[in-house]
Image (cartoon, rainbow, N blue to C red):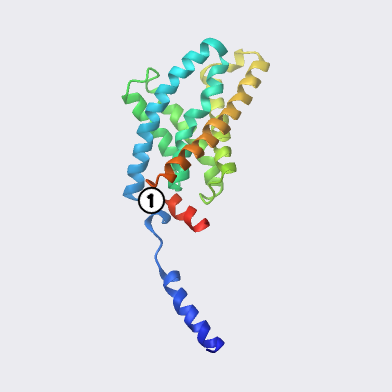
Amino acid sequence: MSNETRNNTSNEAEAPQRNRPLPPALRPGWTMRETVTLAIIGVVFAFLYLGWVQVWLVLQSVAGPLAMDVLMGFWFSGSIFAAWLIRKPFVAFSTAMLTVFVQILAGNPSGAILLLTGLVQGAGSEVPFALTRYKRYSYPVLMASGACTSVFSFIYTWFRFSYWELAGGLVLTMFIIRVVSGVVLGGVLGRVLAGAVHRTGVTSGLAVDYQTRSAE
């Protein structure tokens, strides 16, 4: 067989691959499956967050004001979890807002102020994904999301809880601990939990499923 014939045959075989439309999970816009998945994630993490409040109350009796900063990262993990699985704009932000809505409906004593909390944390978690144009979901990007959310939340709590009245050394310690917590409990743990769910096969049809298979 001549080289020209082999090339023509190869081109004909590759043509269907080139012309095959992208699956819905890899196109702009959310699918119904993605919307339902995000809703489930939001509800599940809302109740996990409510349970985490009890952990905070216990630790607060031992660690005092540092308890919130030590545990804060877990309250970011749902957004990072959802972003890694769905991989589309505003997934992290939407998850943060949905979790606070559910918590308010479930009777969280903080009440409507949680809406502002969700707005701040959701914006912070979204920034690193936006900077990559929603194309990178590696550990460093997820950890950056946790760190960025920590910074946004710290600025918010600075004003809400009047941190300027505290000693400078304590405030710096709180900030460092919160950023570490955001990286570990938000970024790393969120990725580990999402990876565990992905391995069960229930994420079939989501962007993570297509992109991890293409990377293998």
Q: Which residue is mark 1?
A: 204
Judge whether 137 appears above or below 54 on screen. below
Q: Is residue 165 left or right of residue 47?
A: right
Residue drawn at 53 percent across, 20 percent down: 68
Work out which residue is located at the far bottom of the displayed protein and give it. Answer: 2
Residue drawn at 57 percent across, 28 percent down: 181
Q: Which sits in the foreground, 22 or 97?
A: 22
Judge whether 212 appears above or below 176 on screen. below
Work out which residue is located at the far top of the displayed protein and give it. Answer: 61
Q: How dense is the environment of label 1, judged by Cα within 10 Å: few (below 14), some, or many (20 and up)? A: few
Q: Is residue 139 visible?
A: yes
Q: Which sits in the foreground, 204 or 107?
A: 204
Residue 169 at x, y percent in the picture: 68, 17
Q: Is residue 100 visible?
A: no
Inspect the image, locate mark 1, and give the three-letter code of the amino acid beneath it.
Answer: Ser
Q: Which sits in the foreground, 63 or 99?
A: 63
Q: Which element type, helix, strand or loop, lies under badge 1?
A: loop
Residue drawn at 52 percent across, 56 percent down: 215
Q: Give residue 103's quadrant in the image.
A: top left
Residue 119 at x, y percent in the picture: 45, 32
Q: Is residue 6 left or right of residue 33?
A: right
Residue 62 at x, y percent in the picture: 55, 11
Residue 117 at x, y percent in the picture: 45, 27
Q: Give residue 65's quadrant in the image.
A: top right
Judge whether 55 appears above or below 89 on screen. above
Residue drawn at 40 percent across, 31 percent down: 45
Total numbered labels: 1
